[in-house]
Image (cartoon, grey):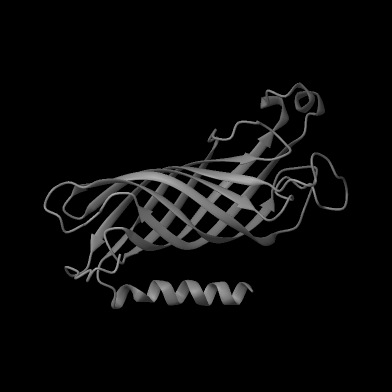
């Protein structure tokens, strides 16, 4: 499965040579964890998240998107609003490396060859494949790989001829309950029927390039 995902990633990114218009850039922001340890806030970045992304714009309405994001996540019970967690006193730190593929849909037409500044909110969805490793916890676990489902909401604007600036919040629903070391076989705690989430919040800056497209009413 891991090899199949890598092959799919390579096939998509090699479209740079034949696609009509492209974006290549960086993501920078913060990350936070939603699960059985630490804060119960859904959006509360507390660790650094960095990434790279590529977009193949198939029309002013949608683009194929590939990205790699690296981040630490952590949970500290004493920082929670839940008194039961404060009393329990668990903590963990985890390292995430994520590859993501999917489609970005623009609510407004986002034609990068428009001479005027263009702005649009957007959503992104697809599939992510990530590795995780608890690096600072008494609940030790081994490095593992799993899938997550990205659900991202953002807004972007062209700020110069070849530059697009965006801001987004992307929640990832994972298919594991082990990001905080809950499924090591050593100890079990929290709600074992509820899988973990992690969230990336930040800004993107992409450089656009490629010949002027003919979208040919494909959207």
Q: Quadrant of the C terminus?
A: bottom left
Left or right of 196 on screen, residue 98: left
Q: Position of residue 36 (x, y in %)?
A: 73, 38
Residue drawn at x 40%, y 57% as measured from the top left: 104
| Residue 103 against residue 154 in the figure, above or below | below
Residue drawn at x 80%, y 23% as measured from the top left: 87
Residue drawn at x 72%, y 45% as measured from the top left: 180
Q: Position of residue 24 (x, y in %)?
A: 32, 60
- In front: 166, or 91? 166
- Residue 157 visible in image: no
Quadrant in which residue 33 is drawn? top right
Q: Quadrant of the N terminus?
A: bottom right
- In front: 129, or 103? 103
Quadrant in which residue 190 is drawn? top right
Residue drawn at x 70%, y 59% as measured from the top left: 143
Count of numbered tags: 0
Q: Position of residue 56 (x, y in %)?
A: 33, 66
- Residue 9 visible in image: yes
Left or right of 149 on screen, residue 81: right
Most distant residue in the right direction: 186
- In front: 93, or 161? 161
| Residue 179 against residue 1 in the figure, above or below | above
Left or right of 162 on screen, residue 206: right
Left or right of 195 on screen, residue 88: right
Q: Position of residue 82 (x, y in %)?
A: 72, 24
């Amino acid at each position: 499965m891991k090899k199949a995902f890598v092959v799919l990633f390579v096939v998509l990114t090699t479209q740079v040579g034949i696609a009509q218009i492209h974006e290549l850039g960086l993501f920078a922001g913060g990350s936070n964890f939603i699960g059985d340890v630490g804060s119960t806030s859904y959006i509360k970045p507390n660790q650094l998240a960095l990434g790279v992304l590529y977009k193949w714009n198939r029309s002013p309405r949608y683009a194929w998107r590939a990205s790699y994001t690296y981040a630490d996540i952590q949970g500290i019970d004493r920082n929670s609003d839940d008194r039961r967690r404060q009393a329990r006193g668990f903590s963990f730190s985890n390292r995430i490396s994520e590859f993501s593929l999917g489609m970005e849909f623009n609510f407004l037409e986002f034609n990068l060859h428009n001479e005027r500044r263009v702005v649009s909110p957007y959503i992104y969805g697809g599939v992510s494949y990530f590795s995780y490793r608890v690096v600072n916890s008494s609940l030790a676990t081994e490095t593992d790989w799993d899938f997550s489902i990205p659900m991202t909401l953002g807004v972007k604007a062209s700020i110069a001829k070849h530059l697009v600036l965006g801001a987004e919040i992307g929640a990832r629903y994972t298919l594991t309950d082990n990001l905080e070391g809950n499924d090591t076989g050593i100890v079990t705690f929290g709600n074992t029927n509820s899988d973990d989430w992690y969230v990336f919040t930040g800004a993107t800056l992409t450089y656009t390039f490629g010949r002027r497209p003919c979208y040919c009413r494909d959207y």
